[in-house]
Amino acid sequence: MAGEHRPIVNQLSEIEYSFRPERSLSQEVAHSAMATDVVTTLQTTIQELAQAVANMQRAVDELQQEQALQTQAILNTIRGRWDAAQNGAQSAEAILVALSPNLAGKVNALPFVPSR
């Protein structure tokens, strides 16, 4: 049509793009060093946590052993096996001293003599 004015469209004006400047080599090196530091820190943290879990497991194991010994000492007492002189290591006295070495020589269990 005569007299119609059509704007000239530049092909580049229709293209949407995002401008992202390239990183410099020094930025890439710095980024890589930070990533290495993060990995090293994470590895150290994981090792520390693993050590803490191992320490807790040892403590739990020790408590379980102590509980088993305490239970055995109670059973030995009920059965009349409290003096080490007569019953040796299977006496309540021996187990108590094993659990608390500072009781050595301080526990004077009387021999069990059943009354008849």
Image: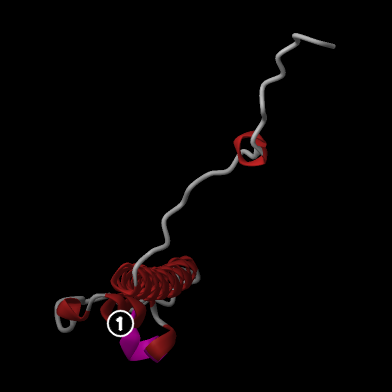
Determine the residue positioned at 42% across, 68% down: 60
Q: Which residue is mark 1?
A: 98
Q: In the rendered view of the protein, which quadrant contains the N terminus? A: top right
Determine the residue positioned at 42% across, 73% down: 50
Residue 55 belongs to the span the image colors magenta? no
- Report the magenta stretch's main SS: helix
- Where residue 62 appears, as percent x and y from the top left, is 39, 74
Kindly give the residue lying farthest to the top in the view shown: 3
Q: Which of 96 and 68 lies nearest the eye of the viewer?
A: 68
- Height in image: 99 above or below 5? below
Q: Secondary structure at mark 1?
A: helix
- Where residue 29 appears, as percent x and y from the top left, is 33, 75
- Height in image: 25 above or below 94? above
Q: Amino acid at mark 1?
A: Ala
Residue 87 belongs to the span the image colors magenta? yes
* Magenta residues (range): 83-88
Classed neighbour count for the residue bearing mark 1: other residues with Cα under 10 Å, few (<14), some (14–19), many (≥20): some
